[in-house]
Amino acid sequence: MSETPRFLDGNAAAGELEALFGVDMTQTSGPCLGCGQQVIIAQAHAFLGGPGTVLRCPGCDHLLLRMVHSPDRTWLETSGLGYLELPTTGTPR
Ligand SMILES: [Zn+2]
């Protein structure tokens, strides 16, 4: 018996990420610290059913990003990413 994957792609977290960063984050990328793969957020595996939102690496399942909200706070963990690379097109310099 095979299990159906219980995740969506990273686009499922787009609205939540945009509310936090103020820009569309789906084309943001960063290196997975589990396997080194450069992961685009839209391609990450998104788990939305828990107490927070979790994004995992599509290559090795390493935890990339976790967001948890309470009525007055948001916690953001990105310790599974080496960095986040955001496009700056249109941003004044
Ligand atoms: Zn990985």
Image: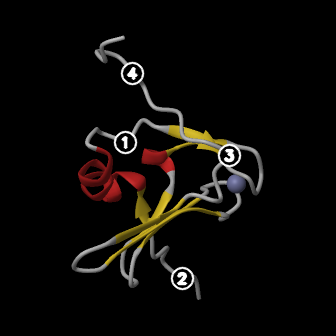
Who comes first in sequence, dot 3 or dot 2? 2
Q: Measure how far apart labels 1 and 4 are at the Cα level.
A: 11 Å
Residue 15 x, y percent position in the rendering = 24, 54
Image quarter of the N terminus: bottom right
Residue at 30% across, 39% down? 24
Which quarter of the rendered image does ligand 1 occupy? bottom right
Instruction: Report the residue marked by disc 3.
Output: 82
Residue 42 x, y percent position in the rendering = 42, 46
Task: Judge depth for marks 2 and 1 and give the one in front.
Answer: 1
Query: Judging from the image, what secondary structure is the residue with disc 3 in?
Result: loop
Instruction: Report the residue marked by disc 1.
Output: 25
The residue closer to the viewer here, 61 or 19, is 19
Who comes first in sequence, dot 1 or dot 4? 1
Badge 2: how crowded within 10 Å, few (<14), some, or many (20+)? few
Residue at 45% across, 31% down? 86
Who comes first in sequence, dot 3 or dot 1? 1
Q: Measure how far apart labels 3 and 4 are at the Cα level.
A: 19 Å
Task: Judge depth for marks 3 and 2 and give the one in front.
Answer: 3
